[in-house]
Image (cartoon, rainbow, N blue to C red):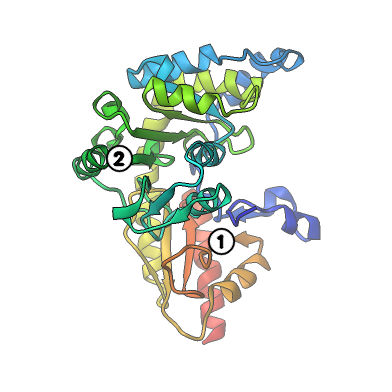
């Protein structure tokens, strides 16, 4: 299994900190946490646990279709977007693929696990793009991606646009490709509810593509690729979640602007501009490594993401930190200031 953020379990096992004492900046989730009515939605759906999930996930697909003004036949649910990335790579097993590094490492792992190779773009039959990109936080305008999609159509290549963080970007309609599915027969758009609704334990993800692509991918899925509780709760969040997401985007901008200013003011840490809910930061002092810094923060119950597994980033130099609530961000900055001061 690859390296990902959000693994607080080893720290819990050590017994030094309780679950409510750990600040996890390695997991880039909605800083407001889950919607306030999530517990009610789970309670309403818990009766379905005694039954097998409805095999076609009609309720979920129709909810996603209404949200994106798409045919429900163009929606495919999965056990999170990581599961769907591997499904796509299995569907195109053995084909050459391109990724725009540095980016989410699961694309490369999935391609290699299914007999493919990572190649230059001009030889690839499958292209993975992350928008906004992980770990840089940069977002590409839709107009630029439309040009990429047109080029892929001409070359007979499939374009996968991972929009896992799109719900957290200001004015997501300006950037999302999901409304362009009817224009491109080789476009696949990935969506995650993990980040936007802070529900990583439920594993709710889906993709949107032409009904033909969806049918081909569905044939490779095992039965019940999404559990019934996740499907029911996910459908209701798709139906009623936009006011919560609008509130999130407003709060996130404030938290993000403040955190970037505070990180930049520390000296020795340079955060890159970000449109997402995290920052890629470069350690400027050659005497520091990301592992050493992560270890010292861990001793204070704070987790960050070391970025050595991202292709294209200088080893030892980069960390990624999520944007959390203001008081939590202040605790991170205070700990960093203390660590860097003591080291000086």
Number of the label disc, if any, that sits on residue 170? 2
Q: Look at 26% across and 48% down and name the residue there.
A: 140
Query: Could you say which disc has been placed on residue 210 in the image?
Result: none
Q: Estimate the x, y position of residue 122 in percent, counting from the top left.
A: 28, 54
In the structure shown, which secondary structural element does the residue marked by tag 2 occupy? Answer: loop
Determine crowd level at label 2: few under 14, some 14-19, many 20+ residues with C-alpha closer than 10 A: some
Left or right: residue 274 versus residue 54 is left
* Residue at x 53%, y 78% (from the top left corner): 289
Residue 80 in the image: above or below residue 326: above
Residue 15 makes an appearance in the image: no
Whether residue 279 is visible here, answered yes or no, is yes
Where disc 1 sits, the SS reads loop
Query: Which is nearer the eye, 249 or 309?
Result: 309
Q: Is residue 227 left or right of residue 268?
A: right
Percent coordinates x, y for residue 12 in the rendering: 75, 54
**Residues at badges 1 and 2 in contact (C-beta under 8 Å)?**
no
| Residue at 42 percent of width and 78 percent of height | 268
Given residues 155 and 25, the one toward you in this image is 155
Marks 1/2: CA–CA distance: 24 Å
Locate residue 82 relative to residue 167 in the image: left or right: right
Q: Quadrant of residue 262?
A: bottom left
Q: Which mark is residue 304?
A: 1
Percent from the top left, x then y, of residue 20?
69, 48
State the residue in front, 215 or 242. Answer: 215
């Amino acid at each position: 299994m690859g390296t990902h953020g959000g693994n607080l379990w080893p720290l819990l096992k050590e017994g030094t900190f309780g679950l409510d004492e750990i600040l996890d900046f390695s997991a880039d989730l909605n800083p407001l946490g889950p919607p306030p009515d999530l517990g009610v939605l789970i309670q309403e759906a818990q009766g379905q646990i005694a039954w097998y999930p409805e095999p076609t996930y009609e309720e979920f697909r129709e909810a996603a279709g209404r949200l994106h003004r798409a045919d429900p036949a163009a929606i495919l649910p999965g056990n999170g977007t990581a599961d769907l990335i591997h499904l796509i790579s299995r569907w195109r097993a053995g084909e050459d693929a391109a990724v725009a590094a540095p980016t989410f490492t699961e694309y490369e792992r999935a391609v290699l696990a299914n007999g493919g190779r990572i190649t230059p773009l001009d030889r690839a039959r499958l292209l993975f793009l992350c928008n906004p990109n992980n770990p840089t936080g940069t977002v590409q305008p839709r107009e630029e991606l439309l040009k990429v999609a047109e080029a892929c159509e001409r070359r007979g290549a499939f374009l996968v646009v991972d929009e896992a963080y799109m719900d957290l970007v200001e004015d997501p309609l300006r950037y999302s490709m999901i409304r362009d599915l009817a224009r491109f027969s080789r476009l696949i758009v990935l969506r995650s509810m993990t980040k936007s609704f802070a529900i990583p334990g439920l594993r709710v993800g889906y993709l949107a593509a032409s009904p033909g692509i969806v049918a081909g991918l569905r044939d490779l899925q095992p039965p019940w690729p999404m559990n019934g509780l996740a499907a029911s709760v996910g459908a209701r969040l798709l139906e009623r979640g936009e006011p919560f997401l609008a509130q999130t985007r407003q709060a996130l901008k404030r938290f993000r602007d403040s955190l970037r200013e505070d990180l930049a003011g520390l000296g020795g840490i340079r955060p890159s501009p970000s449109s997402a809910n995290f920052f890629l930061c470069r350690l400027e002092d050659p005497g520091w490594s990301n592992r050493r810094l992560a270890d010292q923060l861990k001793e204070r119950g704070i987790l960050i993401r070391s970025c050595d597994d991202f292709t294209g980033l200088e080893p030892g130099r980069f960390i990624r930190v999520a944007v959390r609530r203001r008081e939590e961000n202040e605790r991170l900055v205070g700990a960093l200031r203390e660590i860097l001061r003591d080291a000086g």
